[in-house]
Image (tube, rainbow, N blue to C red):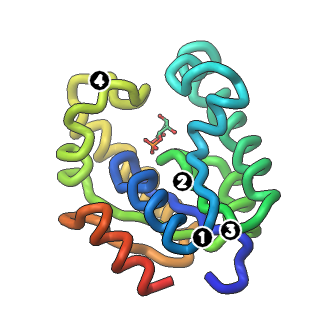
């Protein structure tokens, strides 16, 4: 990651992008920003409200604009939302201005970690496992395409994952 101006974490919901990202940023002396929070700060409403009012397509546009603002700077670790890779413009921005790490977890790991989560718009259906499998099938190739490095966070605490990942960067 020596030449890239920023570090970008991609991967599905529950992979640890925020929990590992915060720790990693501290270790490397980078500013930490969660792209979902940047969208919320900029719009003044929650991600769930944007999905309700503008649909997923509206959210993706706002997400791309947020990534463009964040990646314009440097020395920032950006934790993206799990679907950020769906947008070709967002993928291009990440690759241009960041070293991109794909945090992998697997659907079983996601189900465990997201068991108590109620605020993700894409997880409102009863059959979460089916939803997560469908999302994974559609997105795994995009994560692979966008990433400079893939790191498996399954069975690792955020602290353990951060130490191991830091050694690889
Ligand atoms: C999404 C993941 C969420 C958030 C939004 C959509 C997705 O971010 O951007 O709910 O499409 O997978 P996290 O991956 O941080 O949960």
The residue lying toward the viewer, choosing from 19 and 86, is 19
Q: Nearer the viewer, mark 1 or mark 4?
A: 1
Which numbered disc flags the more N-terminal residue, 4 or 3? 3
| Residue that mark 3 sits on | 6
Q: Are marks 1 and 4 in contact (CB under 8 Å)?
A: no
Is 20 left, or right, of 38 in this rendering? left
Q: Secondary structure at mark 4?
A: loop
The Cα–Cα distance between marks 1 and 4, rounded to whole angstroms, is: 39 Å
**Residue 125, labelled with which disc?**
4
Image height of 68 relative to 74, above or below: above
The Cα–Cα distance between marks 4 and 2, rounded to whole angstroms, is: 25 Å
| Residue that mark 2 sits on | 79
Residue at horizontal 26%, vertical 40%? 114
The residue lying toward the viewer, choosing from 158 and 111, is 158
Q: Nearer the viewer, mark 4 or mark 2?
A: 2
Which numbered disc flags the more N-terminal residue, 3 or 2? 3
Q: Are marks 3 and 1 in contact (CB under 8 Å)?
A: no
Image height of 94 relative to 116, above or below: below
Residue at horizontal 51%, vertical 65%? 26
Residue neighbourhood size for the residue with mark 1, other residues' Cα within 10 Å, grouped as few (<14), some (14–19), many (≥20): few
| Residue that mark 1 sits on | 29
The quadrant where residue 156 appears = bottom left
Q: Position of residue 118 (x, y in %)?
A: 31, 25
The quadrant where residue 126 appears = top left
Q: Secondary structure at mark 3?
A: loop
Residue neighbourhood size for the residue with mark 2, other residues' Cα within 10 Å, grouped as few (<14), some (14–19), many (≥20): many
Queried on whether the Cβ of the residue with tag 2 lies below 8 angstroms from ligand 1, the answer reads: yes
Q: Nearer the viewer, mark 3 or mark 1?
A: 1
Which numbered disc flags the more N-terminal residue, 3 or 1? 3
């Amino acid at each position: 990651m020596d030449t890239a101006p920023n570090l970008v974490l991609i991967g599905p919901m529950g992979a640890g992008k925020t929990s590992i990202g915060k720790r990693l940023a501290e270790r490397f002396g980078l500013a930490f920003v969660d792209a979902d929070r940047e969208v919320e700060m900029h719009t003044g409403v929650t991600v769930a409200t944007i999905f309700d009012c503008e649909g997923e397509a509206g959210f993706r546009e706002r997400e791309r604009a947020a990534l463009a603002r964040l990646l314009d700077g440097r020395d920032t670790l950006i934790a993206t939302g799990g679907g950020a890779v769906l947008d070709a413009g967002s993928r291009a921005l990440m690759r241009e201005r960041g070293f991109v790490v794909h945090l992998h977890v697997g659907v079983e790991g996601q189900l465990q970690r997201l068991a108590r989560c109620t605020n993700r718009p894409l997880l409102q259906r009863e059959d979460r496992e089916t939803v997560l499998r469908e999302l994974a099938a559609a997105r795994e190739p995009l994560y692979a395409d966008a990433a400079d490095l893939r790191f498996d966070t399954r069975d690792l605490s955020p602290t353990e994952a951060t130490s191991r990942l830091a050694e690889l960067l």
